[in-house]
Image (cartoon, helix red, strand yellow):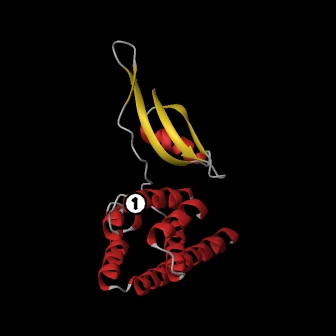
Amino acid sequence: MSKFFYRVKNNNNEIKIGHIHAVKIQDAANILENKGYIVLELSEETITKNSSVKTGNTLLYSPKILSLKEKKEFFNSFYAQYKSGLPITEIFRYMAFYAASGKVKSISILILKSIEKGNSLKQATAKFSDILGRAYTALLYAGEESGKLDEVLFSIVKTLQREDEIKGSIISAVTYPAAIFFMA
């Protein structure tokens, strides 16, 4: 079992730091997320031969993938804030504080940090194309390049709503025969 240093944010937007024991870094991240924290930093600590504590490379934790519900939350919030005229940095700052999902908060913080370092929206979101979806990040890039980001965000929001409707239809189509079978 390893010891991990963490820096997290709780629901009151307070930063907390501490240590946690887990087998691997992903297990530590899962434990902290299950407690309702947004993981900002997570690193493994090792003890060297001279008994001094050495912190490994600090890793910014990012979620593996967003669910359909989380993608809807991310892009709906992004679209609404963009349409209101907020600058990109303020949009992600807002999302980092007010998103309902911890994963959406985490990805918003990571994108915000990347933009604050001088990266464009394309560069910032390209790092997280596996999390947000490759098609959606490609659409964001196209929207930014063409100057029609609002239209692209609207299109993404509508597409995600249709996906959710289709998913609901499939679930109800499968549930009805199963319910009839069990009732019989």
What number of labels is visible?
1
The vertical placement of 74 against 35, above or below, is below
Where on the picture, by quarter, is residue 140?
bottom left
Q: Residue furthest right?
A: 183
Q: Residues within 10 Å of mark 1 (few under 14, many from 20)?
A: few
Left/right placement of residue 126 relative to residue 45 reads left
The vertical placement of 62 against 55, above or below, is below
According to the image, label 1 marks what residue?
A: 116
Q: Position of residue 170 (x, y in %)?
A: 52, 77
Q: Position of residue 165 (x, y in %)?
A: 54, 81
Name the residue at 58% across, 64% down: 99
* Image quarter in which the C terminus is found: bottom right
Name the residue at 48% across, 34% down: 5
Front in this rendered view, residue 100 or 70: 100
Front in this rendered view, residue 183 or 33: 33
Report the amino acid beneath label 1. Glu
Front in this rendered view, residue 171 or 70: 70
Q: Position of residue 22 (x, y in %)?
A: 49, 32
Where on the picture, by quarter, is residue 43?
top left
Q: Is residue 118 visible?
A: yes
The vertical placement of 47 against 55, above or below, is above
Q: Is residue 167 visible?
A: no
Q: Position of residue 41 (x, y in %)?
A: 46, 43
Q: Residue furthest top?
A: 50
| Secondary structure state at the residue bearing disc 1 | helix
